[in-house]
């Protein structure tokens, strides 16, 4: 199956409330529609991850993120925009549109605008950002390939996009936009 067909399959899976495995800048991720509580709960259950920890949202364009954030100062967003699209996650105060199953125990949301072509195709096709969490069990090693992800999760994942990762070897840095505190 071509990458274009795999992306189409991924888009259809997300539209129907499914979970996909897909490449990002550095690792394979699990993703779904962040506004679909059932899909997000499926990811949390698959990973064994606590909802309280919150999840990162990844987008193809800042317009997909702006309704979800409430920057404290104009410079906070300006700083983030200088790094996007790219391999930098920023934490902003969340807007009322952010569901609690995404923000977890926090009044904030972690967001990134990706330059990865697969992420861009998915988010552009759906016109929404996606949940982006590493494709592994919580507190376990990141799985290095779609083959490994299939072996670990099997048919619990609705679609797999077997395309190259980006050029980064580590997950994105996570920085609090207002204080510049580095969390990862």
Image (cartoon, grey):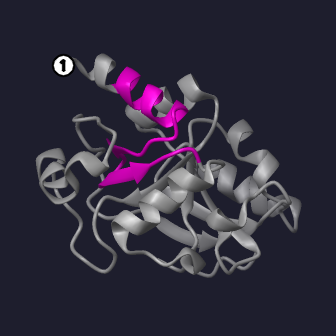
- Reading the image, the residue beneath label 1 is 1
**Which region is colored magenta?**
7-33
Crowding around mark 1 (Cα neighbors within 10 Å: few <14, some 14 to 19, many 20+) is few
* Front residue of this view, candidates 140 and 178: 140
Residue at left offset 57%, top offset 36%: 60
Residue at left offset 44%, top offset 48%: 31
The quarter of the picture where residue 105 lies is bottom right
- Name above or below for residue 86 compared with residue 175: above
Give the image location of residue 153, x and y in percent: 23, 56
- Name above or below for residue 38 compared with residue 113: below
Q: How many marks?
A: 1
Residue 45 located left or right of residue 165: right
- Name above or below for residue 37 compared with residue 137: above
Residue at left offset 11%, top offset 47%: 147
Q: Does the magenta stretch include residue 5?
A: no
Give the image location of residue 23, x and y in percent: 32, 43
Residue 34 located left or right of residue 65: left
Residue at left offset 64%, top offset 74%: 104
* Front residue of this view, candidates 104 and 91: 104
- Looking at the rendered structure, the secondary structure element under dot 1 is loop
Give the image location of residue 83, x and y in percent: 58, 52
Q: Does the magenta stretch include residue 9?
A: yes
* Front residue of this view, candidates 83 and 92: 92
Residue 162 located left or right of residue 94: left
* Front residue of this view, candidates 170 and 156: 156
């Amino acid at each position: 199956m071509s990458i274009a067909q795999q992306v189409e399959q991924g888009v259809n899976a997300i539209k129907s409330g499914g979970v996909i495995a897909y490449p990002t800048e550095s690792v394979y991720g699990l993703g779904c529609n962040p506004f679909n509580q059932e899909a997000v709960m499926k990811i949390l259950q698959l990973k064994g991850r606590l909802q309280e920890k919150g999840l990162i949202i990844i987008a193809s364009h800042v317009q997909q993120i702006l309704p979800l954030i409430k920057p404290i100062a104009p410079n906070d967003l300006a700083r983030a925009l200088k790094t996007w699209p790219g391999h930098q996650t920023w934490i902003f105060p969340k807007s009322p549109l952010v569901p609690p199953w995404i923000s977890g125990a926090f009044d904030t949301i972690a967001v990134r605008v990706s330059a990865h072509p697969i992420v861009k195709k998915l988010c552009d096709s759906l016109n929404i950002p996606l949940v982006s969490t590493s494709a592994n069990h919580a507190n376990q090693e990141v799985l290095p390939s779609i083959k490994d992800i299939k072996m670990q999760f099997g048919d619990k994942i609705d679609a797999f996009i077997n395309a190259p990762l980006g050029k980064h070897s580590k997950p994105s840095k996570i920085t609090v936009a207002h204080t510049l505190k580095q969390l990862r």
